[in-house]
Image (cartoon, rainbow, N blue to C red):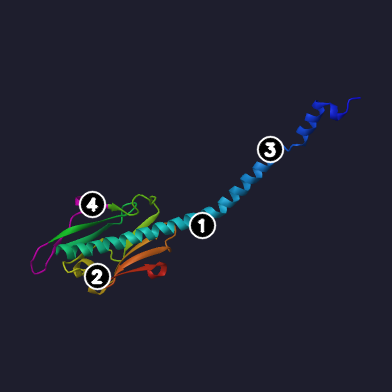
Amino acid sequence: MTGWKTNPHFLRRCLRSSQPEAGFTLLEMLVVIIIAAVLFAIAAPGWVAFMNRQRLSTANGQVLQALRTAQAEAKRTRSYREARFDFAADPPRFAVVPVTSQYNPNQSLISLTNAQITTWQTIGQGNIVRGTIRLTDNHAASDSIIFSPDGSVVRQNLAPNNPSLNQPYTITASLQRSPTIKRCTSVQTLLGALSQGVNTACP
């Protein structure tokens, strides 16, 4: 009788049968996929909300920068500069443009129309999805603010028919699907002092 020590084929079969098989079973793969799907479903809303808040902060930062740029250019060029906002655009857009002045007793200012402006910049610079963010201001009669050559705010541009509403001029960025989540930038004084607010601090 031939023993296992003298039968090389028997020995090879024994060694192969003792080695574990590599890979995963179909059941194991399904369990992993289900767990991953559950974790994604839990994390996705929080991640989307975080990204939307980041986009909101970016939009508010651009509003602040537009106002600062208009004020700085007015001082540098010793002329009137306007920070114009297009609230109807989606995503909203803004531009800093020159304003001509007629030196008459009323010192009337002549602004460009939206169609004449060629320097529009989109809020978010292409990183904000349409229908995500909305811009509004607290003065229904105005979509802009004008700074005079000394950097102060032109009063009649804010509320020409109601001086009590002149300050502050506030632009609010909010999430369209969560309007209570807001960021805002305000021109607090006629000298052009700027401040920012969050949620309940915004109109």
Of residues 194 and 114, the one nearer the viewer is: 194
Task: Report x, y in % for residue 73.
Answer: 20, 62
Badge 1 amino acid: Gly
Badge 3 amino acid: Ala
Task: Report x, y in % for residue 86.
Answer: 28, 55
Q: Seen from this angle, which residue lies furthest left? A: 104
Q: Seen from this angle, which residue lies furthest right? A: 1
Residue drawn 16% across the image and 66% down it: 149
The residue wearing badge 3 is 22
Whole-Å distance between the Cαs marked 2 and 1?
A: 37 Å
**Left or right of residue 20: residue 165:** left
Secondary element under disc 4, as helix, strand or loop, is loop
| Dot in front, 2 or 3 | 3
Quadrant in which residue 160 is drawn: bottom left
User: Which range is magenta?
Assistant: 101-120
Secondary element under disc 2, as helix, strand or loop, is loop
Secondary element under disc 1, as helix, strand or loop, is helix
Q: Are marks 4 and 2 in contact (CB under 8 Å)?
A: no
Q: Who comes first in sequence, dot 1 or dot 4?
A: 1
Badge 4 amino acid: Thr
Q: Who comes first in sequence, dot 4 or dot 3?
A: 3
Badge 2 amino acid: Gly
Q: Quadrant of the C terminus?
A: bottom left
